[in-house]
Image (cartoon, helix red, strand yellow):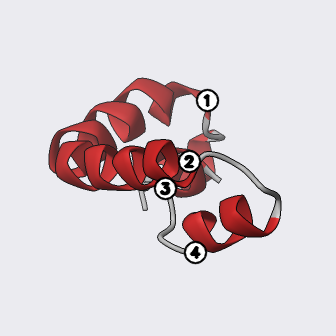
Amino acid sequence: MILIVAVPVAAGATVWTGRGDGDQPTMAGLVVASTLLSPVAVPLTTSALRPLLSPECADV
């Protein structure tokens, strides 16, 4: 579950934004930004949320 929170926005989100008559340029920008930030954001997020894991899962 932690990795789902930490990974970048999916590129398929732009398709769903278009189908829902949303703002595609903004969504494309979010995809690019989250992808560029992911090398820093994923380790920080997993480190921050690791205390929430149960003890038997924390050593994996």
Graded by Cα atoms within 10 Å as few (under 14), some (14 to 19) or many (20 or more), the crowding at tag 3 reads some
Q: Is residue 49 above or below residue 22?
A: above
Q: Is residue 38 above or below residue 48?
A: below
Graded by Cα atoms within 10 Å as few (under 14), some (14 to 19) or many (20 or more), the crowding at tag 2 reads some
* Helix, strand or loop under label 4: loop
What residue is disc 1 on? 52
| Amino acid type indicated by mark 1 | Leu
Q: CA distance from mark 4 to mark 2?
A: 20 Å
For marks 1 and 3, the one nearer the N-term is 3
Tell me if label 4 and label 2 are in contact, CB under 8 Å: no
Tell me if label 1 and label 2 are in contact, CB under 8 Å: yes
For marks 4 and 2, the one nearer the N-term is 2
| Amino acid type indicated by mark 3 | Val
- The image quarter containing residue 57 is bottom right
Instruction: Kindly report which numbered mark, 3 or 4, lies closer to the viewer in this rendering.
Output: 4
Instruction: Kindly report which numbered mark, 4 or 2, lies closer to the viewer in this rendering.
Output: 4
Q: CA distance from mark 4 to mark 1?
A: 29 Å
Give me the residue at 61% from left, 29% from top. Answer: 52
What residue is disc 2 on? 2
Give me the residue at 47% from left, 35% from top. Answer: 50
Q: Is 25 situated left or right of 29 in this image?
A: right
Question: In the image as oriented, which residue stretches furthest toward the right?
Answer: 20
Tell me if label 4 and label 1 are in contact, CB under 8 Å: no
* Helix, strand or loop under label 2: helix
What residue is disc 3 on? 9
Q: CA distance from mark 1 to mark 3?
A: 23 Å
